Amino acid sequence: MHVQLKTNLLRTVAMLTTLTLASCNTLTTEQYEATALTRYTWQVKYADDLTNEQVPRFETFATTSLLNRNGLKPEGAVTGPDDKGLWWSVLPPRPSVDEIEQRKKSQEAGSPELLKSVKYELKYRLGEEQRVLPTNYQVYREVVKAYPSRIPLQLTLGLDNNSVEKAEPVGRLQVSRQQVRR
């Protein structure tokens, strides 16, 4: 029975790998723009016991955001670039004690926390089609490096072509392929 379980598991992994590889496409584009939406959010964690609560309740208060494009300093940037090359807006106002207490239920206590988040997207054009897809920090950084010279990028799309998983400058790909042939 143990051997049968291993065999079934291996078949399942092989099938999922095949499906994943089959559903990922690559394309080359010369028109692209990467954005990173940096966001500060004040969030308050509410619970009867803040240290031991299994399912605390969260309330969002003030938020500020700033859209970074291709690594260039955006208008309104207050801090940055940080260690990831991102610019940030002004901090949102911290919730007051009165605001925190207004949203409190029964014996709950509330603990405010300033959260930082980043949402990465890549806009690209291929022929007449323009798409905007979610992406990751690594792709954002590749675009930032390629953008000033407008180097064409080979993009690897994710599952069902609904994200950009990888971006590589085409010139670097050609050099790598030539080195492999030697």
Image: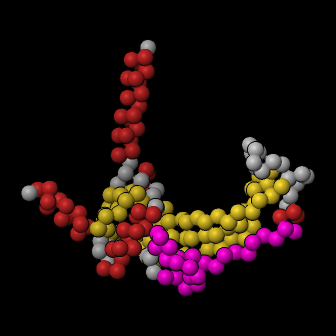
**Vertical comparison of 61 with 11: above or below:** below
Q: Residue lying at the far bottom in this picture: please name it.
A: 75
Q: Which residues are magenta?
A: 73-98
Image coordinates of residue 169 in percent, x first then y, are: 29, 68
Q: Is residue 49 left or right of residue 62?
A: right
Q: Is residue 31 visible?
A: no
Residue in view at x 76 percent, y 45 percent: 53
Task: Report the colour scheme.
Answer: secondary structure
Image coordinates of residue 87 in percent, x first then y, are: 53, 76
Quarter-of-image position of residue 131: bottom left
In the rendered image, the quadrant that contains the N terminus is top left
Callout count: 0
| Predominant secondary structure, magenta span | loop
Image coordinates of residue 168 in percent, x first then y, are: 31, 64
Of residues 50 and 126, which is closer to you in this image? 50
Q: Decide whether residue 84 is among the magenta residues.
A: yes
Residue in view at x 86 percent, y 58 percent: 104
